[in-house]
Image: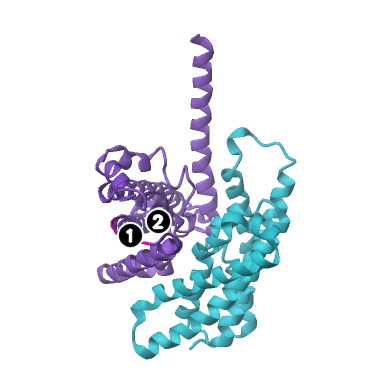
């Protein structure tokens, strides 16, 4: 059992140990969908929702697996739950907003292979959070992911107007900005302690 | 469909192996599987272990996916691939725990996270589900070795500058002041960006030379 206060857990997950910039989880969508500000915000929302649902499910599964003494099934059952949640979100978005569905494109089904979500489920199990702590942890991680994605999209929209050398264009430039952002987020170290 | 698949399956070639090493290197060219690339490369040993674990999973999942490719219905193929991968990752997880507990602690949750490495799912979908077992094994092996090579490039550079050593062997005199930033998360981003810069530079130079040669030749 872990008795960190809820506020500490939230701050820790969103700022101090930001999932993208400190743990390197969810780098693929971070590099792929951060081109436009609007898409980035909505992608963040979708990831937040999947994180919340899968975190609650992961808590239940963990209790169940402990009860029937089968910890080796942990990874397989987590990934199945995440995959089905993503499928649910995909159907929901397709019905509610076809435009957003097209904008997110391939990255929507790829939320399944977003390490941030599986990582969240594994970390909360390792840290031994109870249900409420898990929910707060998921919310913190989701907001941290959205914050990083939106910051990156804002910077990249500005960069489109700048001229950069041929050599630097593309992924290399994005990674350098991510490095600087990550340096900036290090300034939060100690806030949650 | 089965009859058509037979022919390319027998046409095994070394190209399946070679292409993953350089021309289609998963990290430097395809930019796949970034999470472990950045997260565990703060030392060369971690990088090597992660590369080998990924190669192991890649080869075995490619084998099984390729062997079962005629039995998996198209609609549920992604879910099936992920289940196959998750099984092998669980095996690797327990294997590393048995070999070295220290290593298991250093890599932490990132061993389990091999499941969501886009590289493995990508190879299962793009190659193993369309080709025979032999070629798929070669493809997995080539991609795995290319991945390990890239991880070593990053892990080596970060360890040399960040702790002044390589594989734990000290390289510099005691007066050397390590660059702490290289071990921190931001160092991972910077190192990968610099490697990509180097590769971009080489590519641009080759293109310039080729176009120059074309202007002179005719």
SS label for mark 2: helix
Is residue B70 in the magenta section?
Answer: yes
Q: Which residues are magenta?
A: B67-72
Q: Position of residue B70 (x, y in %)?
A: 32, 57
Classify B6 as above or below A89. Answer: above
Q: Position of residue A17 (x, y in %)?
A: 57, 69
Residue A144 visible in this rendered orientation of the protein? no
Q: Residue at x 72, y 56 (%)?
A: A37
> Which chain letter goes with mark 2?
B
- Give the camera-side residue of A138 and B138: B138
Label 1 belongs to which residue?
B57
Residues marked 2 and 1 touching at CB (< 8 Å)? yes
Classify A16 as above or below B126. Answer: below
Say which chain is purple: B
Classify B218 as above or below B83. Answer: above
Q: What color was chain A assigned in the picture?
A: cyan
Residue farthest along the bottom direction in this orientation: A67
Residue A93: quarter of image: bottom right
Q: Is residue A161 left or right of residue B180?
A: right
What is the distance, in whole Å, between disc 2 and disc 1 at their CAs? 8 Å
Q: Which mark is residue B120?
A: 2
Residue B44: quarter of image: bottom left
Residue A37 visible in this rendered orientation of the protein? yes
């Amino acid at each position: 059992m872990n008795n960190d206060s809820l506020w500490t857990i939230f701050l820790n997950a969103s700022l101090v140990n930001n999932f993208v910039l400190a743990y390197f989880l969810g780098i693929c969508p971070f590099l792929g969908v951060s081109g436009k500000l609007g898409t980035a915000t909505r992608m963040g929302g979708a990831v937040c929702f999947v994180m919340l649902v899968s975190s609650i499910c992961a808590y239940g599964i963990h209790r169940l697996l402990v009860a029937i003494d089968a910890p080796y099934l942990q990874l397989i059952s987590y990934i199945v739950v995440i995959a089905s949640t993503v499928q649910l979100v995909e159907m929901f978005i397709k019905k509610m907003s076809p435009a957003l569905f097209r904008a997110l494109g391939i990255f929507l089904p790829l939320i399944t292979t977003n390490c941030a979500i599986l990582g969240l489920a594994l970390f909360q199990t390792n840290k031994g959070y109870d249900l409420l702590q898990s929910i707060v942890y998921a919310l913190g991680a989701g907001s941290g992911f959205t914050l990083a994605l939106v910051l990156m999209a804002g910077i990249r929209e500005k960069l489109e107007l700048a001229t950069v050398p041929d050599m630097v264009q593309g992924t290399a430039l994005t990674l350098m900005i991510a490095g600087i952002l990550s340096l900036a987020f290090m300034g939060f170290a100690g806030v949650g302690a | 469909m089965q009859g058509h698949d037979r022919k390319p399956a027998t046409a095994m070639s070394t190209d399946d192996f070679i292409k993953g090493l350089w021309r289609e290197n998963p990290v430097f060219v395809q930019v796949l599987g970034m999470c472990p690339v950045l997260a565990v490369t703060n030392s060369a040993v971690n990088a090597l272990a992660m590369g080998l674990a990924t190669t192991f999973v890649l080869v075995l999942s490619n084998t099984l996916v390729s062997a079962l490719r005629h039995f998996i219905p198209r609609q549920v193929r992604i879910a099936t691939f992920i289940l196959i991968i998750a099984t092998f990752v669980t095996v690797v997880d327990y294997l590393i725990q048995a070999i070295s507990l220290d290593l298991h602690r250093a890599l932490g949750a990132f061993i389990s996270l091999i499941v969501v490495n886009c590289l493995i799912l990508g190879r299962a979908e793009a190659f193993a589900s369309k080709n025979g077992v032999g070629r798929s094994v070669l493809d997995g092996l080539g991609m795995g070795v290319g991945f390990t090579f890239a991880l070593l490039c990053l892990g080596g550079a970060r360890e040399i500058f960040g702790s002044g050593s390589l594989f734990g062997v000290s390289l510099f005199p005691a007066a050397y002041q390590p660059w702490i930033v290289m071990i921190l998360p931001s160092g991972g981003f910077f190192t990968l960006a610099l490697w990509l810069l180097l590769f971009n530079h080489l590519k641009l130079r080759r293109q310039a030379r080729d176009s120059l040669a074309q202007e002179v030749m005719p």
